[in-house]
Amino acid sequence: MSLYIGREASKLWKRICAETTAEIKLLAENWKYLLGGLICQYIHGLAARGVHYIHRPGPTLQDVGFLLLPELGQDKAYISETVFTSIFLSFVFWTFHPFILKSKKIYTVLIWCRVLAFLVACQFLRIITFYSTQLPGPNYHCREGSKLATLPRPDSIVEFLFMNFSQGMLYGCGDLIFSSHMIFSLVFVRTYQKYGTRRLIKQCAWLAVIAQSFLIVASRKHYTVDVVVAWYTVNLVVFFVDRKLPELPDRSGSAGFLIPLTKDNKTRDENLKLLNGNSGDLADKRPRTQISGKITEDGNTVHGEGLMNGG
């Protein structure tokens, strides 16, 4: 048992090292896209923070979702955040599965370049939308009488730039149309729908997004229009942006150019097998037929007893 565990641990370590080598090469080629995407996430956070300064609380607007769905209340508002966190973390963990699992279809660096492109396009449209018209926030901390409904003007630009992102995510007001939670969830689920391999997980992911849509409205974090607009906007953005982006390389046939030769004389084929999920031995295991032969005086080789006896 210990021998088996040791052998599997060795294979796992080799797989991690081979995958890391490939991902580092891809990171060196695509780091500008990743950095640009992360900077845009920061800009989106600043924009959401900025609209909070000009938010003015008022009566909650009439909403069909509010009439049909019972209000969860402040003590159960965590339910929608729990569903969102589950979707978010599950997708993040899945993008790093090539480092561990044998079966793999994606490269971590390339999939995140693609995901960030989808997010940036959606968030650009979102910023334009919620700055065009500021609606009174339906969330509890955005209503009239709440101290968090409006923010005092920042004393300096530094205070504005170095904001508390966690507080902005939980207690923001004014950035309503369309829902940022739905942007992330739909982008993640659509990406897994295309590159994931488990049908059951795909079905559960879509059910989770649908449930999150209802929970967001029931928690009064968004109006129904914020969720509805997110559903068709994000899907359309992902559809058109995906057509413009180059398709991800096939792991089964294009990983070879990423793998250098190792110092201990291991071949390129071994690293390819580790990357593509085939961790079998490199020795040729095809059955071989043992042939006995005898060289005659005229230089010909006679095989087998039957041939030697004229059979």
Image (spheres, rainbow, N blue to C red):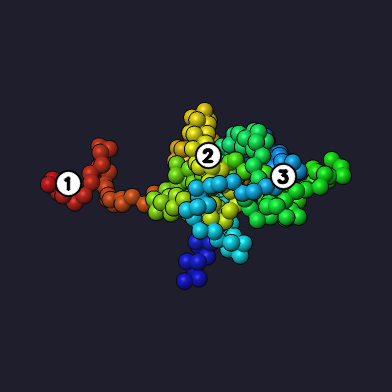
Secondary element type, mark 2: helix
Residue at 64% across / 48% down in the picture?
59
Total marks placed? 3
Q: Is residue 93 visible?
A: no
Residue 242 disc label: none
Residue topped by disc 3: 56
Name the spot of residue 47 as percent of width and height, x first.
Answer: 71, 39
Name the spot of residue 45 as percent of width and height, x first.
Answer: 70, 43
Earlier residue among tags 1 and 2 = 2
In the image, is 68 to the left or to the right of 46?
Answer: left
- Name the amino acid type tagged 3: Arg
Give whichever of 229, 207 is nearer the camera: 229
Q: Residue furthest left?
A: 311
Tell me the CA gap for discs 3 and 2: 22 Å
Foreground mark, 3 or 2, reads 3
Res 26 → quadrant:
top right
Secondary element type, mark 3: loop
Q: Say if mark 1 contacts mark 2, CB within 8 Å.
A: no
Residue at 53% across / 55% down in the picture?
218
- Name the amino acid type tagged 1: Leu
Rendered view: 222 above or below 2: above
Secondary element type, mark 1: helix
Earlier residue among tags 3 and 1 = 3
Name the spot of residue 233 as percent of width and height, x first.
Answer: 52, 36
Give whichever of 80, 139 is nearer the camera: 139
- Name the amino acid type tagged 2: Val
Residue topped by disc 1: 307
Residue topped by disc 2: 229
